[in-house]
Image (cartoon, rainbow, N blue to C red):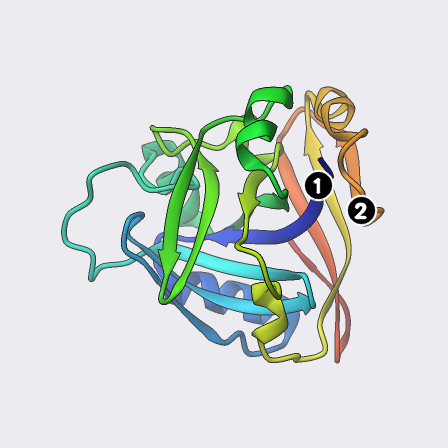
Amino acid sequence: MIFFLDHITVTANALAEGVAYAEQALGVSIPAGSSHPLMGTHNHLLRLSETSFLEIIAPDPACASLTRPRWFSLDDLRMREMLSASPRLATWLTNTTDIRMALTKVLGAAGEATVVTRGDLEWRISVPPDGSMPYDGAFPTLIEWPAGPHPASRMADLGCSLVELEVRHPDAKVIQSSLQALLKDSRVAFRVDPVPSLRALIRTPHGDRQLS
């Protein structure tokens, strides 16, 4: 059971706000994605490699009623207040080939293996019933894609790539210890910090840019 960094996620109260925030930081236009009916969200997506990407996600006003809280803490009042000040790089996701086993074996992994769709794509992802993120987003959400090419391989290559993802948290050493035998990605660095946060260094056609 090996983990690979799959994607990083910027959350916002409104998709246009999140897209503007990320585009200003990176200096590139980020293509539209689609919607997630179960979670009541929609997104834009930027390829970072053949197996990784950046996602900007926000509540979808077109989704009138939901049967559960949205993922990535998007319905949490404290999070919504934070996002009203600015969108933010909220969490990261790791790819696994057996999400059910990972959720039972990996200390810190949280949620249920929930089936989600976007268009004709279907996958499993770890989402707690209340929509929260483990360790305030510093511990990765787990995702299991269907067999075949990674979704990022079908995205337009705009010349962007992830150089480093810095994960800051008071319990960064605990998170790192839980993942060190599984996570095979030298781009991820852990730093102890009293304030949880993420910072991504992304190489773009305009040079290296930071997103946080």
The residue at which mark 1 appears reads as 3
Q: Residue furthest front?
A: 147
Say how many tags the image has. 2
The residue at which mark 2 appears reads as 185
Q: Secondary structure at mark 2?
A: loop
Q: Reading the chain from its start, which is encountered first: label 2 or label 1?
A: 1
Compared with residue 130, is residue 199 higher up or lower down, i.e. above or below? below
x and y, in percent, of residue 4 in the image? 71, 47
Q: Residue furthest left?
A: 64
Left or right of 69 in this view: 158:
right
Question: Residue at point 46% right, 45% down?
Answer: 124
Question: Residue at point 74% right, 43% down?
Answer: 166
Which of the image's four quarters has the N terminus? top right
Which one is in front, 21 or 124? Answer: 124
x and y, in percent, of residue 20 in the image? 48, 69
Which one is in front, 40 or 15? Answer: 40
Q: Secondary structure at mark 1?
A: loop
* Contact between labelled residues 1 and 2, with CB atoms less than 8 Å apart: yes
Q: Residues within 10 Å of mark 1 (few under 14, many from 20)?
A: many
